[in-house]
Amino acid sequence: MIARLTTTIAAVAVAAGAWSFAVSGPAQAAGPAIEYPQHDWSFSGPFGTFDRGALQRGFQVYKNICSGCHALSYVAYRNLEDLGYNEDEIKAIAAQALVVDGPNDDGEMFERSGIPADRFVSPFPNEKAARAANGGAYPPDLSLIVKARPDGANYLRALLVGYVDPPADFNLMPGMNYNAYFSGHQIAMAQPLWGDDVTFEDGTAATIEQQAEDLTTFLAWAAEPEMEERKRAGVMTILFLLVFTGLLYATKRKIWADVH
């Protein structure tokens, strides 16, 4: 899993550039910095952890709404074990995907059902196909999107809930959508969340805000699945250093006790 996250700097740079949602046409006008609403995330801070319920709900949102356009190519189906899914559930989820494999004995590529070891299947075979299906805009891979932008989690949540009617004097270009938290306020991606887009398995109400929060949590995990392990290691290291410092101090006091 950790190996999956040790991607090249180039991959992160591509993800960062792509999170313009591939707005086509004239460049966005520069404007003042946008302040994103700050959210109290369960995974924030040195002791933060991922909420498993939120992760599973976020995966539902990604699977039912986002996966038709956005890839998650650095995540394998077997990684869903971190979300609390068991082996049989993961096999069933993977089997819903068609994976291009091969070549076979005849030298030809073929399709098969996905297995847990496969990475999430991209909705398009290549970038040109993705652009052709989206009016020239390229839906970015979401694997590292939360790490690709400053204050990534709050940015993503704000973007998802930021679709509102434009001001009367705003010149919205044809084919674009107004978003209060997107730079330039013009974005190619249409509003993805409307409320009750999915039926959460745990019975949680699927409001726009809830879906945005859960999807952001899921994508934060996708970008850094080793976060909890890293934080635990950091806490244990600090505790060890504190104890070690105390022992060193006590040893120093004992050794130099008779020196005046």
Image: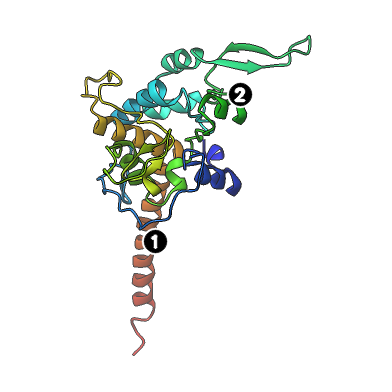
Quadrant where the image shows the C terminus: bottom left
Q: Which residue is mark 2?
A: 125
Quick check: 121 left or right of 213?
right
**Residue 46 in view here:** yes
Which residue, as the protein is rendered here, is positioned at the far bottom?
260
Amino acid type assigned to the residue bearing label 1 in the image:
Leu
Q: Residue at x 47, y 28 (%)?
A: 79
Which of pointers 1 and 2 lies earlier in the amino acid sequence? 2
Q: Point out residue 213 in the picture as x, y percentages from the top left corner.
A: 29, 35
Q: Point out residue 226 in the picture as x, y percentages from the top left corner.
A: 45, 40
Q: Point out residue 96 in the picture as x, y percentages from the top left corner.
A: 48, 13
Quarter occupied by residue 109: top right
Q: Which residue is mark 1?
A: 241
- Given residues 257 and 128, the one toward you in this image is 128
Please tell me whether residue 48 is drawn above or below residue 212 in the rendered image: below
Quick check: 15 left or right of 85?
right
